[in-house]
Amino acid sequence: MPETRPYPIGIPGQAWGRPELIAWRSRQRRQRSYADDVVSALDQQRSHWDVCRYGELEYGDERYPLLAVRSAAWRDELPGVLVTGGVHGYESSGVQGALRFLTQHAAGFEERVNLLVVPCVSPWAYERVQRWNFDAVDPNRAFKPNGPAQESAALMRLVAPLRGRFVAHIDLHETTDTDESEFRPAKAARDGEAFEPCTIPDGFYLVDDAQNPQPAFQQAIIDAVQSVTHIAQADSNGQLIGSPLVAPGVIHYEVRSLGLCAGVSGARCTSTTEVYPDSPRTTPEQCVAAQVAAVGAAIRCVLQRPDRALQSY
C-alpha cells in the first residue's frame, strides 16, 4: 500500500471553510475549452437536431451555456432515451462518447426513439479536468430537490417535464487513477475525515439501480462493450470500489438516495458506465468507443427486448 500524505489544503480532521475553498479554487487551471470542444460541435448539428439552451452556469465572471440536443420531431408515441455525459468534468470519454454517438450513430435510431442528449453537464469542471464544480461540490451527489449544484439543478429542470416518459437513461462516466490520488483524498480533507485507500478497478463496469435492478439491460451493455475493451474483474473481496459484484462487471448503488444523475429521469432502465482510461490494456480511443457501444446497446435492448430489459434479479 503506497504511503498516503495529507492533502495540501486544510487541517486534518477539520472540515473546510471558505478560506480552504478559496485555496482549492486557486489551484484549478483551465486546461481545455468547452466552447471549442462541445459548443462548436453542437452548433454543427443544428441543421438536423434541436439544439436547445436549457440554462446558464454562472461562476464569478464566467458564463457557460448549458446545451442539450433532442429529436427535432419529438413524437409522443415513441419511447424516450436520455444520454448524459460530463457530469464529472474530468471524465473525458463521457463527453466525447456522447458527442460521437450523437454525430455518428444517433440518426440510426431517430425514427424509433425520442432522444435527449446532454453531452457535458458540468462545463466549468470539464475545462479544469475536475470532478467537483466551482463550489467544491460533486454534481453527481446533488441530483436532489434543492441540491447544492447549479449543474444538477439545471438538468433536473430540463428533464422534469419528461420525467417518467423515458424508457432508458445511460449516464457516461469514468473511474480513473486520479480518483484515488486526488479526488478521494480531496473529499476526505474537505469533509474533515480520514482518507481510506481503495482499489481502482481495471476495466469497464456498470452501476445499476439497487431499487430497480435491470439485469438484462446491464448484460446487453456488457456484451456490446466487451468487444471494445475489457470488463473489470472483482477484487479479492468479490467487490468493485467497495460494492459487491452482482453480475460480471455490474454493481448496485442506491441511485436516488445518493443523488446520482441516473435517478433524474424516472426511466425504467438506467445504467451508469464506468470506463478505466488509465489501464495499460486500453487507449483513449477505445474508451470513447466503449461509451458509444454502451449507448447503442442500451437503446437496442429496450427496443428489441423490452421483456428481458425489465427482468429483475
Image: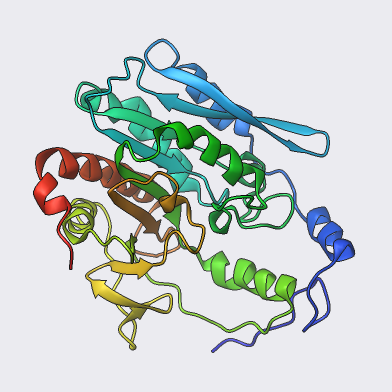
* Residue visible at 49% across and 24% down in the picture: 41
Determine whether 275 is above or below 85 in the image: below
Q: Residue furthest right?
A: 19
In terms of depth relative to the viewer, which is nearer, 225 or 49?
Answer: 49
Whole-percent x and y of residue 222? 22, 57
Whole-percent x and y of residue 197? 55, 82
Q: Residue furthest top?
A: 47
Whole-percent x and y of residue 63? 73, 31
Whole-percent x and y of residue 263? 42, 52
Indicate left or right for 198 with 150 as reference: left
In terms of depth relative to the viewer, which is nearer, 295 or 7?
Answer: 295
Q: Give the position of the N terminus as an image quadrant.
A: bottom right
Q: Give the position of the C terminus as an image quadrant.
A: bottom left
Indicate left or right for 128 with 142 as reference: right
* Residue visible at 73% across and 70% down in the picture: 190
Indicate left or right for 266 with 156 as reference: left
Determine whether 153 is above or below 192 in the image: above
The colour mode here is rainbow
Indicate left or right for 190 with 228 as reference: right
Task: State which quadrant residue 106 falls in.
Answer: top left
Number of numbered callouts drawn? 0
* Residue visible at 23% across and 39% down in the picture: 299
* Residue visible at 21% across and 44% down in the picture: 297
